[in-house]
Amino acid sequence: MTDKVSSRPATTVGLRVDVDTFRGTRIGVPSLCETLSDHGIYATFFFSVGPDNMGRHLWRLIRPGFFLKMLRTRASHLYGWDILLKGTVLPGPLIGERLTPIIRAVAEAGHETGFHAWDHFEWQNAIDKMRRGDMLEWMTKGVTTLTDIIGQPPSCSAAPGWKCNDLALSVKQTFPFCYNSDCRGTHIFTPVVNGMVVSQPQIPVTLPTYDEAIGRNGVNADNFNAFLISLVAPEKLNVLTIHAESEGIACLGMFRDFLKTATRQNIRFVTLGSLLKQARNIGRDTITPGFNHGRDGWMAYQSQGREIAAHAGCRP
Ligand SMILES: [Zn+2]
């Protein structure tokens, strides 16, 4: 069988892999590395390196919105019961300490390696209450751990659950990040915090994640890949987030099919750092909280990109 090459113009997609849990790191990351290597793709991995307390999300079952999402995405299938129980009946293991070789292998394979979280759950749950000192301590623990693992400071960071505020942007300036990817939006921008320009640019995520899209507007596991490819546009910034816990484990076959189809359609995947190198005329913007039908609670949005982000299935 010969594959017909698409007449679609060559399109670049920044590929970001979020790693939130112990299980995602142990099982999902090696599988994704192998899959990306098969396609000659380099991506940006954002690691969580402290305690895995993501199982505490179970307590959110008492909140109706999150309960519906768990049912919609069949969370136990997507994440595995061991993830859902981590930090509840089981103690939260230190991911970076226990899985050092796996994280180091990602950096050694040539992927871009960034900081995602010390304790992913804690950040998502407590950012609204955290003061500068709390954030600095939380980030320092994570960045120090990741630096020890990969032998150099991580070049970028991404806030857990796209939960970011002006204080967090300001605290990030303490670290030598070349850029951050903390929000949803439409184009690369330089953030402005309290009227001051921040030196680290933002590379927003433009495309919905699997768990946000599935079960809405007729999108299901069978047509998700086609839906995602339909949102990729050559004239726009395209940034996709996959998760080691889903695309690396339960949805690995689907993700492999996605890469095959996307390659046939002239889509090329690069690190987020590569997108930044190619960016011209980076403007200024602010971040602002907004809501997304597919996700529990608020997320940070690029202010000027809110209406366009809404078109991609995200309600600001
Ligand atoms: Zn995450």
Image (cartoon, grey):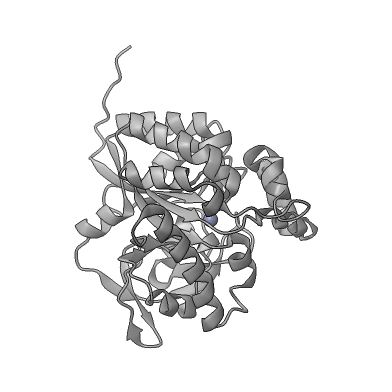
Q: Residue at x 27, y 35 (%)?
A: 266
Residue farthest toward the top in the current orientation of the protein: 1
Q: Is residue 63 left or right of residue 131?
A: right
Q: Indicate the quadrant where residue 196 lies.
A: bottom left
Q: Is residue 235 left or right of residue 203?
A: left
Instruction: State the count of labels.
Output: 0
Q: Position of residue 253 (x, y in %)?
A: 50, 28
Q: Is residue 225 left or right of residue 215?
A: left
Question: Of residues 92 and 173, which is closer to you in this image?
Answer: 92
Question: Of residues 152 and 164, which is closer to you in this image?
Answer: 152
Question: Of residues 111 and 61, which is closer to you in this image?
Answer: 111
Q: Position of residue 231 (x, y in %)?
A: 40, 46
Q: Indicate the quadrant where residue 50 lies.
A: bottom right
Q: Position of residue 81 (x, y in %)?
A: 71, 41
Q: Position of residue 3 (x, y in %)?
A: 30, 19
Q: Residue at x 29, y 34 (%)?
A: 40
Q: Residue at x 52, y 39 (%)?
A: 28
- Residue 208 appearing in the image: no
258 w.r.t. 291: above or below:
above
